[in-house]
Amino acid sequence: MSTETKETRPEDPKTHSTVDLPGEEPLGKLIADEVNDVVSDASATETDFSLSPSQSEQNIEEDGQNSLDDQSPLTELQPQPLPPPPTIETRISESPGEEESSDLVTEQQSQNPNAAEPGPRVRKRRRRKRFFTEINANPAFSRNRRTSVGKEVDSEALIAMSVGFPVYSLTEEEIEANVVSIIGGKDQANYIVVRNHIIALWRSNVSNWLTRDHALESIRAEHKNLVDTAYNFLLEHGYINFGLAPVIKEAKLRSFDGVEPPNVVVVGAGLAGLVAARQLLSMGFRVLVLEGRDRPGGRVKTRKMKGGDGVEAMADVGGSVLTGINGNPLGVLARQLGLPLHKVRDICPLYLPSGELVDAGVDSKIEASFNKLLDRVCKLRQSLIEENKSVDVPLGEALETFRLVYGVAEDQQERMLLDWHLANLEYANATLLGNLSMAYWDQDDPYEMGGDHCFIPGGNEIFVHALAENLPIFYGNTVESIRYGSNGVLVYAGDKEFHCDMALCTVPLGVLKKGAIEFYPELPEKKKEAIQRLGYGLLNKVAMLFPYNFWGEEIDTFGRLTEDSSTRGEFFLFYSYSSVSGGPLLVALVAGDAAERFESLSPTDSVKRVLQILRGIYHPKGIVVPDPVQALCSRWGQDKFSYGSYSYVAVGSSGDDYDILAESVGDGRVFFAGEATNRQYPATMHGAFLSGMREAANILRVARRRASSSASNPNQTCIDKEEEVDEEEDSCLDQLFETPDLSFGNFSVLFTPNSDEPESMSLLRVRIQMEKPESGLWLYGLVTRRQAIELGEMEGDELRNEYLREKLGFVLVERKSLSQEGESMISSLKAARLNRQIFD
């Protein structure tokens, strides 16, 4: 997060919307005379992601090896334009009636809604300029500008940067894909130019399928191999030819010619799950999506609100803001669907508890002081890094210490203003400042999407429904267990069992923290630790539909101050959706401590409190605040399919934990996606989207490797020979269990030789049934003879499994994961069986 943007601007807080998983409680109507009997409790979760607009700040290398070739791969010929798209370009407007057919929006000042009062100070985002300055000052870029081709290379590099690619280096994904044979050489420099050209070419018309031949038209013939490599990489990783344009939806890639395509179960139909499922289907996989809710979208949810006299509006009670439109994949979808975008205007008046506007001079002073406090925290952090001190403290503690040392905001009004900025920072991170890591809370800053923040008229479920169209989604199936091994994956949802080659888990971090899904074998220790270290916060909303707009059409946000620091996040910021929702809709945000207390209040009491605040602001101006015709209150913390809103970097955590959460387990059997697996774009809708694309590419890579290995050695069932269980050992173990000491259901037991002691160890083997009767997965464990006998006396394998899990805390593992004690037990059994054969 940018210390100059997200935390200091209402429109810039980390926008939060994202991810996935099943289920939602029905909305219950509540009676309230004071609010026209229209208050309902939306037990849907809310997340509002508003990241400040700044481009990705990648370190730009000036090594001569990475400078562009003197002769660019691009020819002097300009590429021929693609055919015109079937849909209109994205339109971004600042206010009703004003539209522009561009992704970039010119800043315009809005008029003050209350002409009788001094106008509120315009709060503009301060965009990062640094990496643009670095580009302009870079010798390679200066040299290239001498020619038209050089200028085109510069322009295309900026477009690629907006998508997340560095200027002069490869991404980790590209290095793993071996796009060039030598890192840092001339081929790399030329590859990057070609890659950027292909990205820019498709981004110029995202409603058409960019072919390899079209990409070749403006590239010199000797670089055809680079074009093939770059095109394949960008296509398979979802950087080009993705989305919802008709020609793209109809396209099918030939990823498994002559080979039966693998099947994948996707757990969760949020943005990450929907994107991954659609991408995998286009690649030729067989895909099934399991969703616990009765709808797609996860934490992206739009509700239709309506009242008498035909007043109605669409309210985003979950993710609501596209945070940075430049390079944003959701911006691509908007262009493909012909959706106009409404820029969130920068003007944001702040009101005192008395209803008066905050003095512009005091406002400016405290905002500057707030930014200086953040700067001092950054300098402290940098000095600790330089001294090699790995110290982490709560961000809130550091800010308060500097505030006291420098005597900031000692006056009551100044303190109220500072509290408002702190509440805005808590909104951006969905948690108390005392929970945030001083060292890494803003680790995603360098990657933020550039451009304006925008609303989608009609709500973000337009994206969700378009992505979910024609996908095989099974609603009402809450996944409870995922078992994986070398033979595949079993996913359990209620009494249903789904067998697949690979599974993609896209559930929110809150669900993983709760342990709502059991994994067998257990997840690796480092992944479990990362799940616990990362923070998962809470943000809530009250959406109110009024009979008319009383706050004015000229603003999209306004804020209010509070005298009590402990309630600074209570309805501190209001979003006006009148220009995009179809009706006079106002949304009040609840952040920090207030967001947690909010969930224990009744919706009626919450709406009464919001009305009290609004009337305190507008009644002194002679403006009547009517009762709403309908109101909704989110309860994301109580939602069993999310248990919160979005992730943050907690004290003791770091960006590395996002990467750990993204790692697959089971030798490429179970994969993970969602906003909390995206280090660059956490807590955002586009972060969830991009994580789904990332994992689709990873699943394809593993599937191809597995298919290639199987083709070269038909008897090999594992990808990595070093980790493969020796076939002779398995065969010997099978022979041992042909005559078990105990056998019941799918359980078999071998006792320790030459011992009848109740506490002597026994080797337990359990058969996990697969989809095909002839196939199965064997799991093992050590139990005492007494426990084995108790298992045999129970009725049914379900009770036995419950006994192992609940009473014994027992985890079954694959043969190759047995402990040293287990291996010793097997050796003893082999020796005893051999001796018996000799003497018999």
Image (cartoon, rainbow, N blue to C red):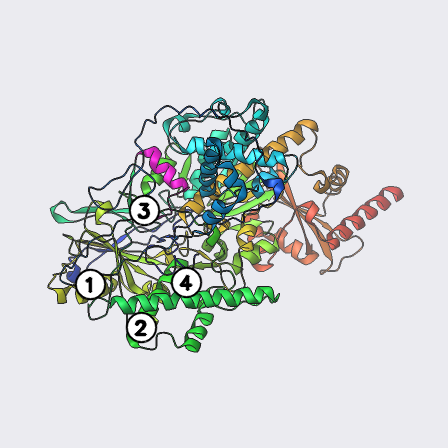
Point out which mark residue 414 bears.
2
Residue range corresponding to the magenta coloring: 322-338
The residue furthest front is: 146
Q: Which of the 4 image quadrants contains residue 168?
A: top right
- Pinpoint residue 176: horizontal percent, then vertical percent: 61, 39
- Are there few (<14), some (14-19), or many (20+) residues within 10 Å of tag 2? some
Q: Are discs 3 and 1 less than 8 Å apart at CB?
A: no
Left or right of 774, for residue 434: left
Residue type indicated by callout 1: Leu
Return the residue at label 4.
431
Task: Please name the residue shown 48% across and 67% down the image.
Answer: 377
- Pinpoint residue 515: horizontal percent, then vertical percent: 50, 55
Callout 2: helix, strand or loop?
Answer: helix
Mark positioned earlier in the residue sequence (4 or 2): 2
- Are there few (<14), some (14-19), or many (20+) residues within 10 Å of tag 3? many
Residue 330 drawn in magenta: yes
Return the residue at label 3.
454
Residue 695 visible in the snapshot: no
Residue type indicated by callout 2: Glu
Which of these two is toward me, 717 or 625? 625
Mark 1 → mark 2, Cα distance in angstroms:
22 Å
| Labels 3, 1: front one | 3
Mark positioned earlier in the residue sequence (3 or 1): 3
Q: Are discs 1 and 2 less than 8 Å apart at CB?
A: no
Mark positioned earlier in the residue sequence (4 or 1): 4
Mark 4 → mark 1, Cα distance in angstroms:
25 Å
Q: Give above or below for 196 relative to 801.
A: above
Return the residue at label 1.
614
Mark positioned earlier in the residue sequence (1 or 2): 2
